Image: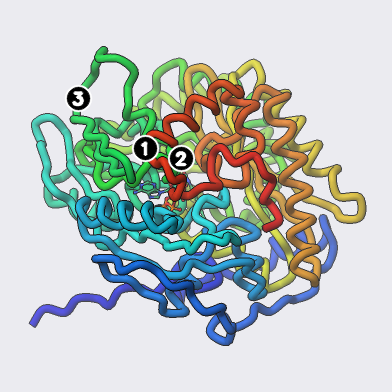
Amino acid sequence: MKHTAPPRRRKLNAWGFEGVSFSPPRPLRSWLEERIGPPEPRSAVDPRSLRLPAPARLPDLPVPTSDDPADRLLHARGRGFSDLVRLRTGTLPALPDAVVRPEDATDVQEVLRICSRAGVRVIPWGGGTSVTGGVNTLPSAAPTVVLDLERLSGLVAVDARSGHARVRAGTLGPALEAALAPHRLTLGHFPQSWELSTLGGWVATRSSGQESLGFGRIEDLVAGLELVAPAGRLSLPALPASAAGPDLRQLALGSEGRFGVITEATVRVSPRPARRAVEAFLLPQWEDGVEAVREMVLAGLPLHMLRLSDPTETEVGLATGTGGHAWSPLARGWLRLRGAGPGSCLLLCGAAGTPREIRWTLGETRRLLKRYRAVSLGEGPGRRWLLDRFRHPYLRDGLFDLGWATDTLETAASWSALPGLYRAVRLVLASTLPNEEVAVLCHVSHAYRDGASLYFTFFFRDAEDPEEMIALWAALKRAATSVLPAAAGTLSHHHGIGSWHAPWYAREAGTDGVRLLAAAARELDPQGILNPHVLFDPVDRLEV
Ligand SMILES: Cc1cc2nc3c(=O)[nH]c(=O)nc-3n(C[C@H](O)[C@H](O)[C@H](O)COP(=O)(O)OP(=O)(O)OC[C@H]3O[C@@H](n4cnc5c(N)ncnc54)[C@H](O)[C@@H]3O)c2cc1C
């Protein structure tokens, strides 16, 4: 008899799966206590004890429709900062009236037709891992349903000769890789949220994975797609390249559920690498590290990952083991003797392929880094990082329990603008809260020929009152987001716009750009039922 594992249940008010956690290690707690002060432990309310408002009456829908309280709670918010605070404290301003689960594109079309006619809002939902307020149900006079694509999942077909795979949009990262494995293929798209996010969500948010340097960002991987909207359908064939007018695939990429529901995509897949290796280095200072990363990309080294931590992130990583493994004081003394003292930066260089290909790539990397006086730490820290890479997000909930708040913020800019952007964001995060210390870490998460992304993590102490806590976070988020356009940084390198960055979107796309996109949305969705607060809604909703 064949046994299949029961599906893993998601936590209702935290990141990830039930039964998995990541407690903040003691050195990290000591570091935070020293930097931002002692916390006061905060416990979360039991989500099952919450009294939920009764769901609104909905028109009959021809697909499984659930108004089960746990289902409504699980689909009320994404997994960004205020989402978790509201879920932990039971202070949700609104809940979806139902969760609907179509099985194919015809079901989706039918749900959209009926909801459009009845004035019911529809929020397309992949894995619900948005960190930009992208899937949040907000207070409204109109009923809201969440369209969960979990049943619309699986591999449809593989064209191995062309390196194409047709995949349904609701397919989760692990299921997609498992389906490609027998073909010895991989998509190679590994965002940190990989275990819980979907192909459709990646396409709708222009996602980037940890190995996008090697395999490409999601927009490089999409060859064709299908999108179903209340008033139309886009069926864009898989083509290697085309000069047939503007590329409509780009309208779906980053559309965040506003133009329609992506029901499937044909993606470019690659041979599955036999092995992965990540070698760690310490570089004497941040500026050298940034220059080394730039040179490695321009030299065309076939690396799959480059990740450079700034001195503070390196200090935390080496002391606590969160960026690899913890280094004893003796080992750190040895590193200092070799020129990697305080102020040095941890660089992770990842390669994938046959053992021979990896040896060659890392050999060339070492040769190039010699000129930057890099000290190799070997493959130990990288092995640890690979093992823990999908566990790290659980740390945030452990910190919440202890009374420390943390969030992340990411952007990108040209190489010329990068140093100014780094300084501006660090300064604004560290100086915005008048009565609280904020600790700021940063790493270069992705690098390109013309620039790189910066990924900031910041910590501050929780407030007891959830509204006060969200207000502190919103003040930091507002201040940091406001400096991005002025410092030539994008509003987002890979998280997207959602409802939280929407008030700033016109600064990047221009008012005419936003007008053009809003007109396209009106054509496809004349009643404006699809995820109406993302992308173009200029109202600041950080505190909702
Ligand atoms: C801990 C953590 C780590 C993360 N790490 C990364 C990372 O490394 N890289 C990265 O890029 N992002 C990352 N994210 C952000 C998030 O995982 C991505 O934005 C991801 O692409 C969202 O996928 P999802 O399936 O969960 O989409 P959802 O969160 O369900 O939806 C996101 C947006 O897309 C829309 N949408 C979803 N599916 C469809 C569809 N089929 N058709 C139309 N619209 C749709 C939704 O309406 C919403 O606007 C992280 C988030 C968390 C919480």
Q: Position of residue 56 (x, y in %)?
A: 48, 72
In-front residue for pair 8/272? 8
Q: Secondary structure at mark 1?
A: helix
Residue 263, x across and y down, in percent: 26, 47
For this orientation, the residue located farthest to the bottom is 49
Whether pointer 3 and pointer 2 mark residues with C-beta atoms closer than 8 Å, the reply is no
Image location (x, y in percent) of residue 99: 39, 67
Which mark sits nearer the N-terminus, 2 or 1? 2
Q: Of label 3 and label 2, which has the lower sequence position? A: 3
The residue that label 2 is drawn on is: 279
The reply to whether residue 355 is visible in this rendering is: no
Tell us which disc is closer to us: 2 or 1: 1
Q: Residues within 10 Å of mark 3 (few under 14, many from 20)?
A: few
Residue that appears at 42% across and 30% down: 520
Residue drawn 23% across the image and 31% down it: 236
Question: Which mark, residue 524?
Answer: 1
Give the image location of residue 109, x and y in percent.
26, 51
Real-space Cα distance between discs 2 and 1? 48 Å
In which quadrant of the rendered view does residue 414 lie? top right
- Which numbered tag is attached to residue 109? none
- Label 3's element? loop
> Does residue 274 lie above or below 79 as drawn?
above
Which residue appears at 54% of the width and 39% of the height? 535
Q: Secondary structure at mark 2?
A: strand
Residue type marked 1:
Leu
